[in-house]
Image (cartoon, grey):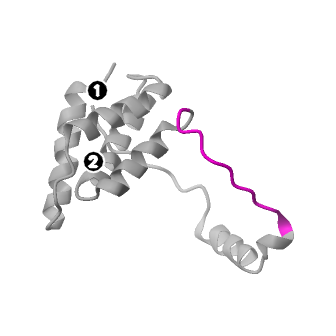
């Protein structure tokens, strides 16, 4: 299964430039009020995975990223259900410990290892 995503741009460069100029002068406090509540981690399990990767450091953030990309591709290819994405990520994170990162090659190898593991072993 191919695990790369290619997206078409939604806005042209001119539209993006115009939008950024409009937003740049906007004062958010005049437009809306933001309130924050604790996140329900049962409802949003991927947030817990992100905090786990952040706390562990090392290669785990790269593992999470690769696992998420593979899981989303599996979902888009109808190989898994949407609610299985967090399970795929958790399996990859459990399998690939937070090894120290000493080079870019370490990050790339963690990415490759996760993709090899999940391309053959993700939940179906």
Q: Is residue 49 above or below residue 29?
A: above
CA neighbours of label 1 inside 10 A, class few (<14), some (14 to 19), many (20+): many
Q: Is residue 44 left or right of residue 50?
A: right
Q: Nearer the viewer, residue 5 or 32?
A: 32
Place of residue 20 in the rendered image (x, y in percent of width and height, measured from the top left): 67, 74
Q: Picture coordinates of residue 35 (x, y %)?
A: 74, 57
* 57, above or below 71, in the image: below
Q: CA distance from mark 1 to mark 2?
A: 14 Å
**The residue tagged with tag 2: helix, strand or loop?**
helix
Q: Secondary structure at mark 1?
A: loop
Highlighted magenta segment, given as a residue range: 31-42
Residue at point 40%, 44% (across, down): 49
Question: For residue 71, which numbered disc appears in the image?
Answer: none
Give the main secondary structure, helix, strand or loop, of the magenta stretch.
Answer: loop
- Position of residue 3 relative to residue 55, above or below, is above
Quadrant of the frame with the N terminus: top left
CB contact under 8 Å: marks 1 and 2: no
| Closer-to-camera residue (57/14) | 57
In the image, farthest residue toward the right: 30
Identify the residue under disc 2.
63
Residue 6 within the segment the image draws in magenta: no
- Which mark is first along the chain, 2 or 1? 2
The picture quadrant where one finds residue 58 is bottom left
Q: Which quadrant would the C terminus be assigned to in this image?
A: top left
Q: Residue at x 64, y 75 (%)?
A: 17
Q: Residue at x 75, y 75 (%)?
A: 22
Q: Quadrant of residue 113?
A: top left
Relative to 120, is 24 on the left or the right?
Answer: right
Seen at 86% across and 72% down, the residue is: 30
Which one is in front, 66 or 29? Answer: 29
Report the residue marked by disc 1: 122
Q: Residue 41: x and y, percent?
A: 53, 39
């Amino acid at each position: 299964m191919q695990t790369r995503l290619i997206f078409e741009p939604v806005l042209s460069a001119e539209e993006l430039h115009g939008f950024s100029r409009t937003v740049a002068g906007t004062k958010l406090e005049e437009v809306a009020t933001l309130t924050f509540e604790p996140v329900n981690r049962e409802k949003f399990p991927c947030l817990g995975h992100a905090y786990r990767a952040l706390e562990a450091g090392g290669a785990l953030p790269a593992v999470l990223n690769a696992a998420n990309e593979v899981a989303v591709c599996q979902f888009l290819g109808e190989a898994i259900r949407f609610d299985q994405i967090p399970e795929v990520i958790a399996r990859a994170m459990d399998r690939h410990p937070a090894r120290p990162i000493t080079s870019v090659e370490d990050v790339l190898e963690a990415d490759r290892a996760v993709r090899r593991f999940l391309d053959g072993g993700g939940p179906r």
